[in-house]
Amino acid sequence: MSVDPKVLNKEVAKRRTFAIISHPDAGKTTMTEKLLLWGQAIQVAGEVKGRKTDRHATSDWMSMEQERGISITTSVMQFPYKEHMVNLLDT
């Protein structure tokens, strides 16, 4: 299977990748939720400290992450934004 280089270059040029990286408890997942919300990938931003709510952060999908209120694994979310495809990594 071969791909036309012009088509490939056009698709690659549309990609935007952002990795949110910092020390623990710096607000990385909160920032991720806001970017997803502003990019209209989600309707309502979740709560990072989810022990008191049923609305957990989108990127904190593991039950252990939701119970502890911390990210354990890196989550990757992808959504269209205007003419681009955004890849968002929450570490």
Image (cartoon, grey):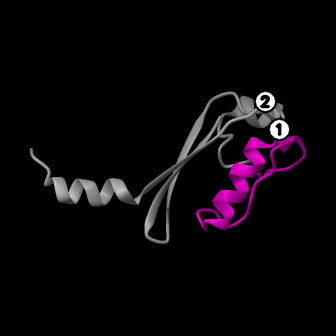
Q: Where's residue 83, x and y in %?
A: 43, 70
Residue 56 visible (yes or no): no
User: Is residue 36 toward the left or the right of residue 65 in the image?
Assistant: left
Q: Which mark is residue 6?
A: none
Which element type, helix, strand or loop, lies under badge 1? Answer: loop
Q: Which image quarter: residue 25?
A: top right
Q: Which residues are magenta?
A: 26-55
Q: Residue furthest left?
A: 1
Q: Residue at x 72, y 64 (%)?
A: 44
In the rendered view, tell whether residue 73 sits above or below residue 10: above
Residue type marked 1: Ala
Magenta run includes residue 34: yes
Residue type marked 2: His
Residue 25 visible (yes or no): yes
Q: Which image quarter: residue 48?
A: top right
Q: Residue at x 17, y 53 (%)?
A: 5
Q: Quadrant of the C terminus?
A: top right
Q: Which residue is mark 1?
A: 26
Badges 1 and 2: C-beta atoms under 8 Å apart?
yes
Q: Residue furthest bottom?
A: 82
Magenta run includes residue 14: no
Q: Where's residue 72, x and y in %?
A: 69, 27
Which element type, helix, strand or loop, lies under badge 2? Answer: loop
Q: Residue furthest right?
A: 52
Q: Which residue is mark 2?
A: 23
Q: Residue at x 9, y 44 (%)?
A: 1
Q: Residues within 10 Å of mark 2 (few under 14, many from 20)?
A: few
Q: How many marks?
A: 2
State the CA–CA distance, disc 1 to disc 2: 6 Å
Q: Residues within 10 Å of mark 1 (few under 14, many from 20)?
A: few
Q: Residue at x 61, y 68 (%)?
A: 40
